Amino acid sequence: MATYHLNAPMTDADVAMLKAGDVVYLSGIIYTARDAAHKKLMAALDAGEQLPFDLKGSVIYYVGPTPAPPGKPIGSAGPTTSGRMDTYAPRLHSLGSKASIGKGKRNQAVRDALKEHNGVYFGATGGAGALLAECITASEVIAYEDLGPEAIRKLTVKDFPLLVINDAHGGELYAKPNYPL
Amino acid sequence: MRMLKAEDVSAAVRDMIIEACRVLPEPVYKAFVEARDSETTDSAREVLDQLIKNADLAKATNMPLCQDTGSAVLFVEMGEDVRVEGGLKQALTAGMVEGYDKGYLRKSMCHPLLRKNTGDNTPAIIHLELVPGDKLKIQFMAKGGGSENMSRCTMLTPAQGWEGIKDFVVRRMAEAGPNPCPPTIVGVGIGGSFDLAPTLAKKALFRPLDVPNPDPEIAAMEKELLEAINNLGIGPMGLGGKTTSLAVKIEMHPCHIASLPLAVNVQCHSARTKEVVL
Ligand code: SF4
């Protein structure tokens, strides 16, 4: 298991070298989107409209932060459960998005899409929103302001701590529960 | 009849909410430290270290512990000899709205189908019980959606009994895996009715982490379930380890001779509860 310091947007070469269990400190520009924003992104794609950000190399962070208190760029900002975005993620990967950040399991369709389109799924520590916000240096709402906490934000991050949960080669980090399911 | 002013009730609710979203109950914090010291893998220890640092930072900088500051769940015990001028529900709601606004907390309530955010975290989910006396006890929980989504309720047959209960609870936590932000706290409601079992499960989550059920037999069942869940090996954030759950809390209630209602309410490690008595 290796440790890397990488930049976002991500390159194909960076994604391809990552293995489940690697630690990544990510710096650069990432975009927030959760349930409602994804729905709007899909509608925009269906209508042939331009998306509010460039999908190429993009890293999408599943988060709905708390409001920024005075003097801070953002409030508490940890990951939400990724599984709810499973229905949308393969399409975004097929259009050039390289990575998502969340917590919890992905389904087979997402794992297949990561392989097919050279993508990666990162986990951040759920419930560590105060700590993770320290790695966000700027935040700006760029679309769907009416969605409130679910609006799309462009975040500037510095050494944001991530774990590779699902890599582009079929690797997966989560422990298999010791129970017949 | 004792009268309470609506503004005093509102202020108490507001302050309790802001504090609860920033400062974890002491026994939960202690459990993080104990779990970190008992884990043997780097990844499990790292997650728990982050949770400890997160709790320290939230307390020191007034930042909410987690970005999901939840549905506002209020369990209220109202003495039969006390009233709130202007109305209890209005006072609770006003305090909740002010707490979420002044505390820079996330407003997470929306229309179930249209998904339009109500904008001020209303409505609060309020459970009211009338009790003897002239006191007003208000318990608050900031209930996160990620762990709530992993909760389930079922109607077992009486024949399924304890074995059936155990299988349902442990299977639920195995299926939930990393999703509800383990290490979790598991609230279990046994008995009552279809509507009461989940309320019991939620109520169980208000019991302090280090306090077992006062009935020694039920306390033993809590221990047995906790051991079975921790044998799953899911570990902190699902990365493997000994600590999948910090505690199991059971509340029991008599039920119909034909039924065995069962509910599992999953609480994440960000177990934000607080109470006030007026
Ligand atoms: S499950 Fe709990 S700790 Fe995890 S993101 Fe939701 S509220 Fe926060």
Image: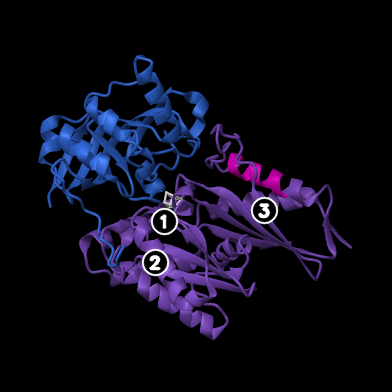
Chain colours: A blue, B purple
Magenta part of the chain:
B92-101
- Same chain for marks 1 and 3? yes
Q: Is residue A148 left or right of residue B86?
A: left
Q: Position of residue A39 (x, y in %)?
A: 42, 29
Report the mark closest to the observer, 1 or 3: 3
Q: B35 or B224: which is nearer to us? A: B224
- Asked if residue B34 can be seen in this view, the reply is no
Which residue is denoted by mark 1 in the rendering?
B56
Mark with earlier residue (1, 3): 1
Amino acid found under the numbered disc labelled 1: Asp
Report if the CB atoms under discs 1 and 3 are less than 8 Å apart: no
Q: Position of residue B144 (x, y in %)?
A: 49, 50
Provide the major secondary structure of the magenta segment. Answer: helix
The chain ID associated with circle 3 is B
Q: Residues within 10 Å of mark 3 (few under 14, many from 20)?
A: some
- In-image side of B189 versus A168 (left or right): right
User: Front-most of B205 and A89?
Assistant: A89
Crowd rating for badge 1 (residues with CA inside 10 Å; few <14, some 14–19, many 20+)? some
Question: Taking A118 as reference, is A66 left or right?
Answer: right
Seen in the picture, residue B209 relative to B272 is either above or below; the reply is: below
Residue topped by disc 2: B245
Task: Please tell me which residue lies in front, B132 or B27.
Answer: B132
Pointer 2 and pointer 1 on the same chain: yes
Badge 2 marks a residue whose secondary structure is strand
- Asked if the residue at tag 3 contacts the one at tag 2, i.e. Cβ–Cβ closer than 8 Å, the answer is no
- Tell me which numbered mark, 2 or 1, is placed earlier along the sequence: 1
Q: Is residue B152 visible?
A: yes
Instruction: Please name the amino acid that badge 2 sits on.
Output: Ser
Amino acid type, label 3: Ile
The residue under the point 57% across, 81% down is: B214
